[in-house]
Image (cartoon, rainbow, N blue to C red):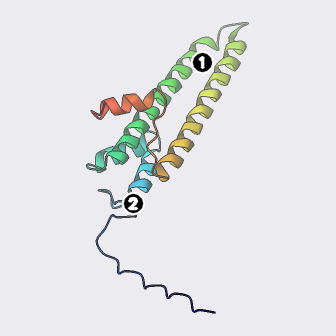
Amino acid sequence: MPDPEPIPPPSPAGPGPELGPKSTSSGLPSNVAAALACIPLIGGIIFYIVEKHDGFVRFYAMQSIILGGAWLLCWFVYSVAHWILTPIPAIGLFFSILLWLAWALVSIAILVLFIVTVVKAFTGVRWEIPYIGPMARKQMGET
């Protein structure tokens, strides 16, 4: 039986494409910084200010700012509507329950969007939240 051909040794590593995630202004890998930037409003503001060069992180930060602003707007509308409609005799309780259900649905939707964006950012995928993603792109001057 003939001897198998010897396997040549691997070539030494030379300069080539960088395989790992690139580092950002914050010193974190790009995907980690983008995932942290997804924390609604606070994470977005911090990473939008700190990160000056990485468009991936800045995009997720801008989406986070817009999503957090939308959440605050919904909370404000809920609070004012609850304050105005709940004291109404006979129908106040109905409105209170209806408003609470609407607020619960909005909160769950925002939580799901937050989880999806964190996972997508951490895996290095640029994902746009429906309606919010195009607004973030426009704010950043991308088309």
Q: Which mark is residue 117?
A: none
Is residue 69 visible to us here?
Answer: no
The image quadrant that residue 66 belongs to is top left
Q: Secondary structure at mark 2?
A: loop
Of the 4 image quadrants, the one containing the N terminus is: bottom right
> Does label 2 or label 1 sit earlier along the sequence?
2
Amino acid type, residue under disc 1 in the picture: His
Residue occupied by mark 1: 82
85 sits left or right of 67 in the view: right
Q: Which x, y percent locates residue 130? A: 49, 29
| Residue at the image position 38 percent from the left and 55 percent from the top | 30
| Residue at the image position 41 percent from the left and 36 percent from the top | 63
Q: Which x, y percent locates residue 43? A: 42, 46
Q: Secondary structure at mark 1?
A: helix
The image quadrant that residue 87 belongs to is top right
Amino acid type, residue under disc 2 in the picture: Pro
Report the front residue among 74 and 57: 57
Image label count: 2
Report the front residue among 123 and 46: 123
Q: Which x, y percent locates residue 6? A: 49, 88
| Residue at the image position 51 percent from the left and 24 percent from the top | 74
- Which mark is nearer the camera, 2 or 1? 2
49 sits left or right of 130 in the view: left
Residue located farthest toward the front when viewing the structure as drawn: 1
Q: Is residue 18 above or below residue 32?
A: below
Of the 4 image quadrants, the one containing the C terminus is: top left
Q: Which x, y percent locates residue 111? A: 58, 38
Q: Residues within 10 Å of mark 1 (few under 14, many from 20)?
A: some
Q: Is residue 64 above or below residue 93?
A: below
Q: Is residue 131 above or below residue 8?
A: above
Residue occupied by mark 2: 21
